[in-house]
Amino acid sequence: MLHEGEVVPSVAVLSHHEQRDRLARYCPQALPAALVAGDPCFDRMLASRPLRDSYRNRLGIGPDQRCVAISSTWGQASLFGRHPSLVLRLARQLPLDEYRVVVALHPNIWHGHSPWQVRMWLAECARAGVVVLPPEEGWRAALVAADVTIGDHGSVTFYSAALGTPVLLATWPEETVDPASPIAALLRTAPRLDPQAPLAGQIDAVIAGHSPAEHAHITELATSEPGRSAALLRAEIYTRLELPEPPVPADSTAVPLPAAQPPGTGSQLIQVRLADRSASVTRFPAAALDEPAVSGGVLVTCADEPDRRWLELAEVLVHDDRYDDPLRWISASLSRLPGCLLAATRDRAGDWIISGTDLPVVRFQGPDDLGPACAAVVHAWLCSGRTPHELPEQLQLGPRTEPVQLSFED
């Protein structure tokens, strides 16, 4: 057992024997201090896989949505350093019912520029539905939940590839990493994102064409002791302290559920395609109006919208508060928005009421997120010359189909 004043010799913990081989080439004097003990961070993500659906639910990812994780390390060569507008462009171009964007920035970005500044940079992204993870925790859960990761030369991108998730490189600065390292090999071979081209097609293509075995010879270098890092590290520590190990196993624990609160969908640009008694809807955040890759749609603005521009451009106004007299709120609101055709809100019973000046009243029951979509459908239905008696009975929102009961009130 160690006595007072004695010093425990230092140790360099490595995750793979490949790192020990490189250490032998670059600094052979350090070999006696080297310990290959796996990667505890990666082991915790492996242990978290059974909780994938729990992480997805906490991040606001629906069963029919794809989770697009965005990871940026720090520095000018990073994703956020070279393409600071990429997160917002993804939020604008990806339909809300088909994708959820989750962004994890390196803690050095948060602390180098201040949390206030980072939140201001990403405020419009959050209003567009992006989940902005705090710097302390959440990125590992996001990697387990992800269907694709867009990243750079940071370790998070490599971890995602090692988990078998498709990756797209937004930057690939090979000059910043050891050319003999696994991350350099990934940078040379992983698919690359063209930030100036339409983004949804690139994401869908890399998911459809992904084979985990394609990069397995690289990503298996993440650890040579998968699942064993906790046991190896504890054994080494207790050996050096000359103490017996505890009798309980040393296991890797699952990472905690993310504390991030997914933002609501807010104001939306809704594209509507009408059929006989059905309608299909593609929803984007209102900010998609500024995106050339997205064209057309009905602007449905929320009553709590902080951006005055969306209020002034609104074609439909939506408020999910419950009113004793919904028609009075609709009439008063539309009188102050001369360019707005319809408004929708709830009555005390929770039914949605949709109406407009000199227009009929439509009532329907349904979940909160269907209110803006149904209001946009009624707008498109009336603008097409159809009568309210021919309102659709089925709504297609991306991959999801919902029956709707839209009833005309005389």
Image: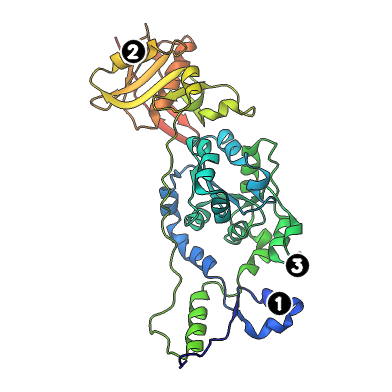
Residue 327: x percent and y percent?
29, 14
Q: On the picture, is 267 further left or further right than 410?
A: right
- Mark 1 or mark 2, earlier in chain: 1
Alpha carbon separation for disc pair 1 and 2 = 73 Å
Front-most of 386 and 260? 260
Q: Label 3: how many residues lie within 10 Å, few (<14), some (14-19) or many (20+)?
A: few
The residue most toward the top is 358
Residue at mark 2: 332
Secondary structure under tag 2 reads: helix
Q: Which residue is mark 1?
A: 23
Q: Compute the Cα span from label 3 to label 1.
A: 11 Å
Q: Is residue 99 visible?
A: no
Query: In the rendering, at what x and y percent does residue 278 appear?
Result: 45, 23
**Residue at (49% x, 75% y) in the render:** 230
Give, as a three-letter code, the residue at label 3. Ala
Residue depth check, mark 3 versus mark 1: number of the one nearer the observer: 1
**Residue 374 higher or lower than 5, as above or below:** above
What's the residue at 51%, 58% (across, down)? 140
Q: Quadrant of the C terminus?
A: top left
Identify which residue, 256 or 311, lies in the foreground: 311
**Outermost residue to the front:** 5
Question: Can I make out residue 6 in this image?
Answer: yes
Seen in the picture, residue 314 relative to 150 is either above or below; the reply is: above
The residue singled out by tag 3 in the image is 180
**Element under label 1?**
helix
Q: Position of residue 224 (x, y in %)?
A: 61, 74
Q: Eyeballing the image, is 380 above or below 35?
A: above
User: Which class describes the residues within 10 Å of circle 2: few (<14), some (14-19), or many (20+)?
Assistant: few
Q: Which amino acid type corresponds to the residue marked 2 in the rendered image?
A: Ala
> Which residue corresponds to the image point at 52% horizontal and 70% vertical from the top-left?
40
Sequence-first disc among 2 and 3: 3
